[in-house]
Image (tube, rainbow, N blue to C red):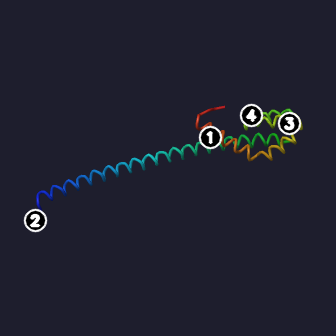
Amino acid sequence: MIVKKKNLIIVCIVVSISVIVASIAISAYVRKASEEREKQELMNKFNRAVDREYKDLEREYNSIVDVIKDYDYSDSFRWKYIIKLSDLVDDYEYRRVYADYGVSSVLSRIRSNKEKDMTTLKTKAQIKVLYGEDD
């Protein structure tokens, strides 16, 4: 079999162009995969930081609620903790309920609002991690 010089040149050009296009495509794919992996790592780091902050806020919330529930403390002392709770969850409803109805009404309000309070704490944890705010 005899290969003509013209056909050999055409084949070499086609192969060269194919190799260049393939290397560009592979490079773009690798770069995109690397960027996606970096984004995922950042999201995982953010989520871990939010979870840590949320657990701290939840622990603080539970300790405040435990003090409010403890009838060994005076109402004025528990009032200070109701204020702390109100500030923690950014809900002044607890202060109003205490002023109108007393500690037992605040306790029932805490039980009914626990889900909402935990959502508020989760949002607060995300904001603290995202913006680095410290109360």
For disc 2, the neighbor class at 10 Å (few under 14, some 14 to 19, many from 20) is few
Q: Is residue 1 left or right of residue 40?
A: left
Residue 87 circle label: 4
Instruction: Say which mark, if any, is on residue 2.
Output: 2
Residue 78: quadrant of the picture? top right
CA gap, disc 3 and disc 2: 101 Å
SS at mark 2 in the image: loop
Quarter of the view holding residue 89: top right
Please give the name of the residue rendered at 46% of the width and 48% of the height, measured from the top-left corner: 36
Image quarter in which the N terminus is found: bottom left
Foreground residue among 98 and 27: 27
Q: Would you call the spot at circle 4 few (<14 residues within 10 Å), some (14-19), or many (20 or more)? A: few
Tell which tag, 4 or 2, sits nearer the viewer.
2
| Marks 3,4: beta carbons within 8 A | no
Q: What type is the residue that disc 1 sits on?
A: Gln
What crowding class fits label 1: few (fewer than 14 Cα within 10 Å), some (14-19), or many (20 or more)? some
Q: Amino acid at mark 4?
A: Asp
Name the residue: 10% across, 65% down: 2
Separation of marks 4 and 2 at Cα, in angstroms: 89 Å
Q: Quadrant of residue 130?
A: top right
Q: Position of residue 33 (x, y in %)?
A: 42, 50
Residue located beneath label 3 in the image:
98
